[in-house]
Amino acid sequence: TAGGGFVVAADVVTANSCAFVSAFNYACELAWVSGNNGVPNTITTQAKVRVEDQSDRVAKDPSNNNFKIISNFKLTVPNGNVTYEVGDPLPIAWENIGTVADVELAYSTASDNFTNATVFVPITANSSPYPWNVGNAISSTVRLRVKSVTDDGFDISDANFRIKGKIVVVDPALAAWAPINQPFTINWTSYGS
């Protein structure tokens, strides 16, 4: 039935739009609504759906292929357009929907290309925030990724952020004297390369 009610497995699906294709044939786009929260929290690589016409339960069709239900992450800090210094404390924060016990944390200095990313925490509890001291990755195109270790769910920073080196002057000390025309020692510590 065009525009009618449909059932996907045990979850209700609403028809967003149905277009007439030919006699008795309609193509519909559907939105999965499960308790008003969307796709259920059942992470799997073997998901299938079945669509039924609510007015004629004999008219139904199961999906031919499996699809994945994955966790849903939103990285909130760092999320771009900020500058950090090597070694500074930075709590990495994210939100997660889905049952995920552990995550991986990585950064890339090639913007959103994570082909050669640096995985600095291969496995940690999915417990935000994670205390991190900014790594020695001096670049203006850094992004961070939080990723489930059990499924394909992940998120990366929305925009690039910058990591710069850090210089801390340690001498001259407070109230030191610097006589004119005399050698004077200046000491500093640098972080990053």
Image (tube, rainbow, N blue to C red):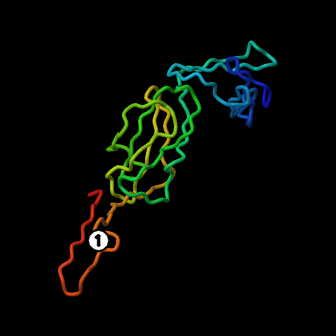
Q: Where in the figure is residue 41, as x and y percent of width and height?
A: 61, 24
Q: Is residue 98 left or right of residue 57?
A: left
Residue at the farthest top position? 58
From this viewpoint, which residue is outermost toward the bottom?
A: 181
Q: Is residue 161 above or below residue 119?
A: below
Picture coordinates of residue 73 (x, y %)?
54, 37
Q: Number of labelled discs? A: 1
Question: In which quadrant will I find the N terminus?
Answer: top right
In this view, 95 is above or below 25 = below
What residue is rendered at 75% in x and 26% in y?
Answer: 24
Classify mark 1: residues with Cα within 10 Å, few (<14), some (14-19) or many (20+): some
Task: Work out whether residue 89 or residue 157 is closer to the camera in this orientation and state it.
Answer: 89
Is residue 104 rendered to the left or right of residue 79?
Answer: left
State the image quarter where residue 120 is shown: top left
**131 to 32, vertically: above or below:** below
Question: As displayed, is residue 162 above or below residue 99?
Answer: below
Identified at 48% across, 44% down, the residue is: 92
Q: Element at badge 1?
A: loop
In the image, is 8 to the left or to the right of 55? left
Residue 7 at x, y = what percent?
73, 21
For residue 121, side relative to residue 25 (left or right): left
Give amino acid for label 1. Pro
Residue at figure coordinates x 49%, y 55% from the top left: 80
Camera-nearest residue between 81 and 28: 81
The residue drawn where x is 79% and y is 19% is 54
Tag 1 residue: 172
Work out whether residue 100 or residue 58 is closer to the camera in this orientation and state it. Answer: 100
Question: Quarter of the image holding residue 123?
Answer: top left
- Figure quadrant of the C terminus: bottom left
On the image, the x and y values in percent for residue 170 come to 30, 65
Quadrant housing residue 21: top right
